[in-house]
Image (cartoon, grey):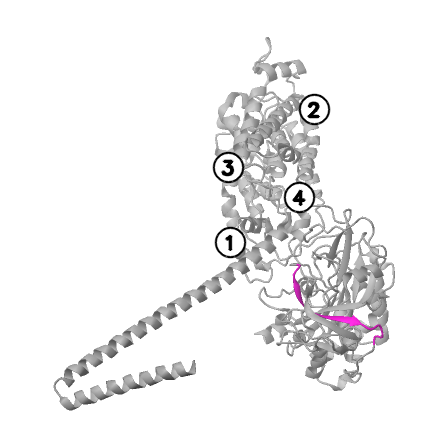
């Protein structure tokens, strides 16, 4: 089925001359110029690195080091468990001082197992991975293996293991590199393209080789003219006809991969499917650059570009930060907080979540640290009743009716909410932004989803308990039945024996023998106890 | 640094219910001015009493319900209801009539259902229909348009005020002398005595499309409506639905029997058509909610308006059409959900 879908309709799509629209979306103030004024700054080695073993979608990595071990920069310290997973590497040299639970950047504010490294300041490099500058002679699986061992995950924010995505199979129509970056404030992809466009292109070429396809589109929103110029210049130099840049009009949430695919191709990814189902694979431009480093230089994923922005930080900018660096150190590198800093958010203005403390580390998914003042993020006004104006439905990229979904979520009518498309909601927040009644719609939907999951878990565990109970009842009934049958048989035999003396003697002998055996058993038990 | 909770998204809305309602009121300013020019200052008195009673009753009910009256008043929804009700009433209406309509609209049609956002019926139209049934005489005494080349006299402010306060015309003034039927009313009466449309339209009451004066009020209302569209306070689906729902049957009837059916243009620019299309049917609370649903909802209002005008007992049918379609909203909403992204149907 997938094969057929991939082949169909491929011809008319992906032309720079013809773009399509996704439903809804909102025009937002970008606030990108706050952090694009300065070139990418490379942050120093912090005194301590905190590397969570789970920085990606999938199971946590298994620690490869123990307390007291010396590690080198780039050395694997966590090995992926399971197919969907990613390894973790030390981002500088030093000593492992602990493997323990530590606060991590997560909306729940919970802790998770982390490898804590006291750095030695020497930043000595591990030399485990060879540069594969001859990768064109290797096959797809070999390249995928490198991507996997380098611990690569999607750097756009979702952190899905890159190697897993690359196993999409053959016959894809095109690779799409996502440089849309539609979230307010975030500009790490913009800066990457401005300064390291050739790296992105090299990554694109490696990805094309790994996927064995001949077509790559780099999509970039029209509010990034500098990045576009740099990208075009780098492309001209490379003169690779397989790569093409397509400028897409700036509209949130265009950077969502399903939305971007629709803009570029007019095709919809099925609700329960993934882009390869219709022949496309989307990677973030930052991921492509990381692929280039992993393949051409043998460099595992140990750093990333983080946008540090907002009116709450003294010197906003983009910083190349080693993974595991505490957020507080990154903010210090940008001049520290301003006096009126109020919020610390990981991610952008639309989907970023508040951090419980600045002690959490930068992880693979940390694309942006937004340090906002009260002026940047005004307090929410009290919510008024929904007036059913329908602006949320106009803005919803999933083509839902948030105003209806809201009633079901609010009344915890979860079946109705699910039926109205609760799980098609991508939590982009567009509905919130256009709501004249200030209703925190996205929060309601997140809550409803969590509630559905919680009830599902409850149902599963109560089902299990019921099954166990029923199994026990059955077993007891079977035992009782067996006992009854046995007694019945014995009674019958006894009756029969009354008529035959030799049988009776045999039975008495049998009973005596059994009783002796039981006694011997009992004394044996006593002896052993 | 304090870390107060802020949940994504962190971008705040630029719009508000207050802005939406405020723009609706502002968009009626041109129509109000034109109306006062042709029919005298009565409308302003009606608006004043309607707004005062609406606000007072909203405060009273909210207090009884233990809600924050100040916050609710700020949304201006009560003001919009009152202004629209006043627009539907004849220019000369005794104050207590208007007050009763406004009270009913706010207390019964809105607050008893739970207040803003919960009312299934359009409050202004519910209030209007109560008055139409309770005060049939007061609700059908209209004035002819002055400044429109019509002979009938101008009603001065003293007369207007006297009638407004007491519900009776001052001595020496009679309805026969000052009153005049609306074009829709006049047309209906004359059709019933077997006059043809062309004969009727030749009368001085009638202008290019609708009645003299009235068609200009309709123009000004439509202008306000276009402003609301431009400001994205309303979307096009309901107005287009209403206008199409009225134009389509009116055109068919006109083509089949031009002697007893007025032209579609007459329907569009008479009575409350434009007010319904842009200001009344577009009340989002009591309207259908999906784009397709709104087209259907609007079309139904237009169609019912045509049916009531042509064969019903009332000259205009907007209020009943809106209330009837309000009842159909849950069903319309049920069957007009858009296809969710990535789903087959």
- Check disc 4 and report the residue beneath it: A436
Single out the mark in the foreground, 3 or 2: 2
- Check disc 1 and report the residue beneath it: A416
Single out the mark in the foreground, 4 or 3: 4
Seen in the picture, residue A44 relative to A454 is either above or below; the reply is below
Single out the mark in the foreground, 4 or 2: 4
Parent chain of label 3? B
Q: Earlier in the sequence, mark 4 or mark 1?
A: 1
Where does the C terminus of chain A fall, quadrant-wise? bottom left
Parent chain of label 2? B
Q: Residue furthest top?
A: B171
- Check disc 2 and report the residue beneath it: B37
Single out the mark in the foreground, 2 or 1: 1
Q: Secondary structure at mark 4?
A: loop
Separation (CA) of disc 4 from disc 1: 25 Å
The reply to whether callout 4 and callout 2 are in contact (CB within 8 Å) is: no
- Check disc 3 and report the residue beneath it: B307
Separation (CA) of disc 1 from disc 3: 37 Å
The segment highlighted magenta reads: A109-123
Q: Give the residue displayed 31% in from the left and 74% down from the top.
A: A478
Along the line of sight, the residue nearer the viewer: A376 or B180: A376
Q: Secondary structure at mark 1?
A: helix
């Amino acid at each position: 089925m997938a094969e057929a879908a991939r082949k169909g309709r491929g011809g008319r799509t992906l032309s720079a001359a013809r773009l399509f629209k996704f439903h809804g979306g909102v025009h937002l103030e970008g606030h990108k110029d706050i952090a694009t004024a300065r070139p990418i700054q490379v942050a120093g080695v912090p005194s301590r690195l905190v590397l969570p073993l789970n920085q990606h979608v999938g199971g946590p990595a298994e620690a490869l080091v123990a307390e007291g071990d010396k590690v080198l920069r780039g050395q694997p310290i966590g090995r992926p468990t399971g197919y969907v997973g990613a390894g973790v590497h030390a981002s500088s040299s030093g000593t492992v001082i602990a493997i323990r639970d530590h606060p991590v950047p997560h909306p729940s504010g919970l802790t998770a197992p982390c490898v804590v490294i006291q750095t030695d300041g020497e930043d000595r490099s591990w030399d485990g991975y060879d540069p594969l500058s001859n990768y064109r002679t290797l096959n797809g699986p070999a390249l995928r293996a490198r991507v996997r061992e380098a611990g690569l995950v999607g750097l756009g924010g979702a952190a899905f293991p890159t190697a897993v995505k690359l196993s999409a199979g053959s016959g894809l129509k095109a690779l799409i590199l996502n440089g849309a970056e539609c979230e307010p404030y975030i500009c790490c992809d913009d800066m990457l393209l401005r300064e390291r466009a050739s790296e992105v292109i090299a990554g694109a070429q490696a990805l094309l080789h790994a996927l064995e396809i001949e077509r790559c589109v780099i999509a970039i929103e029209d509010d990034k003219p500098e990045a576009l110029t740099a990208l075009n210049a780098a492309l001209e130099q490379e003169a690779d006809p397989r790569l093409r840049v397509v400028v897409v009009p700036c509209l949130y949430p265009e950077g969502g991969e399903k939305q971007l695919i629709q803009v570029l191709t007019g095709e919809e990814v099925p609700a329960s499917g993934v882009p390869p189902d219709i022949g496309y694979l989307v990677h973030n431009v930052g991921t492509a650059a990381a692929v280039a480093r992993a393949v051409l230089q043998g460099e595992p994923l140990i750093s990333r570009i983080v946008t540090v922005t907002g009116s709450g930080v003294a010197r906003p900018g983009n910083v190349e930060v080693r993974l595991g660096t505490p957020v507080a150190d990154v903010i210090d590198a940008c001049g520290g907080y301003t006096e009126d800093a109020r919020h610390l958010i990981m991610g952008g203005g639309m989907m970023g979540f508040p951090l419980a403390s600045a002690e959490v580390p930068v992880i693979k998914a940390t694309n942006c640290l937004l340090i906002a003042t009260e002026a940047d993020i005004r307090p929410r006004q009290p919510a008024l009743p929904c007036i059913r104006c329908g602006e949320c439905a106009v803005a919803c990229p999933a083509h839902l009716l948030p105003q209806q979904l809201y009633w079901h979520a609010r009344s915890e009518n979860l079946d109705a909410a699910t039926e109205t498309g609760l799980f098609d909601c991508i939590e982009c927040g567009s509905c919130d932004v256009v709501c004249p009644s200030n209703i925190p719609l996205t929060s309601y939907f997140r809550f409803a989803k969590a509630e559905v999951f919680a009830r599902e878990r409850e149902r599963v565990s109560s089902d299990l308990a019921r099954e166990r109970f029923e199994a026990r009842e059955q077993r007891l009934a079977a035992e009782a039945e067996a006992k009854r049958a046995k007694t019945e048989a014995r009674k019958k035999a006894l009756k029969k024996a009354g008529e035959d003396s030799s049988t009776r003697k045999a039975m008495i002998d049998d009973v005596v023998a059994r009783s002796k055996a039981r006694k011997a058993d009992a004394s044996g038990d006593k002896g052993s106890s | 640094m304090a870390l107060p909770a802020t949940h994504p998204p962190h971008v705040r809305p630029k719009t508000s219910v207050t802005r939406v309602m405020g723009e609706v009121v502002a968009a009626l300013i041109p129509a109000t001015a034109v109306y006062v020019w042709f029919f005298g200052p009565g409308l302003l008195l009606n608006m004043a009493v309607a707004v005062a009673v609406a606000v007072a009753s909203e405060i009273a009910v909210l207090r009884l319900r233990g809600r924050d009256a100040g916050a609710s008043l700020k949304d201006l929804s009560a003001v919009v209801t009152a202004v629209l009700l006043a627009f539907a009433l004849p220019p000369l209406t005794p104050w207590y009539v208007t007050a009763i309509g406004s009270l009913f609209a706010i207390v019964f049609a809105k607050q008893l259902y739970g207040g803003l956002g919960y009312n299934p019926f359009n409050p202004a139209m519910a209030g209007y229909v109560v008055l139409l049934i309770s005060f049939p005489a007061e609700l059908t005494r209209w004035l002819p348009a002055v400044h429109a080349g019509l002979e009938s006299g101008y009603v001065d402010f003293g007369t207007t005020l006297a009638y407004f306060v007491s519900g009776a015309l001052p001595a020496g003034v009679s309805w026969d002398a000052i009153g005049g039927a609306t074009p829709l009313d006049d047309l209906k009466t004359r059709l019933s005595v077997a006059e043809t449309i062309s004969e009727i339209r030749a009368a001085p009451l009638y202008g290019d499309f609708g009645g003299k004066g009235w068609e200009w009020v309709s123009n000004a209302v439509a202008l306000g409506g276009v402003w609301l569209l431009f400001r994205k306070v309303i979307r096009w689906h309901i107005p287009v639905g209403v206008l199409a729902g009225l134009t389509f049957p009116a055109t068919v009837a006109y083509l089949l029997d031009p002697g007893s059916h007025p032209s579609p243009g007459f329907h569009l620019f008479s009575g409350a058509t434009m007010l319904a299309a842009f200001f009344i049917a577009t009340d989002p609370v009591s309207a259908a909610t999906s784009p397709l649903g709104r087209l259907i909802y609007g079309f139904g209002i237009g169609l019912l308006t045509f049916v009531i005008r042509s064969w019903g007992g009332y000259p205009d049918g907007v209020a009943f059409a809106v209330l009837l379609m309000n009842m159909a909203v849950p069903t319309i909403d049920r069957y007009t959900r858009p296809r969710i992204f990535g789903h087959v149907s």
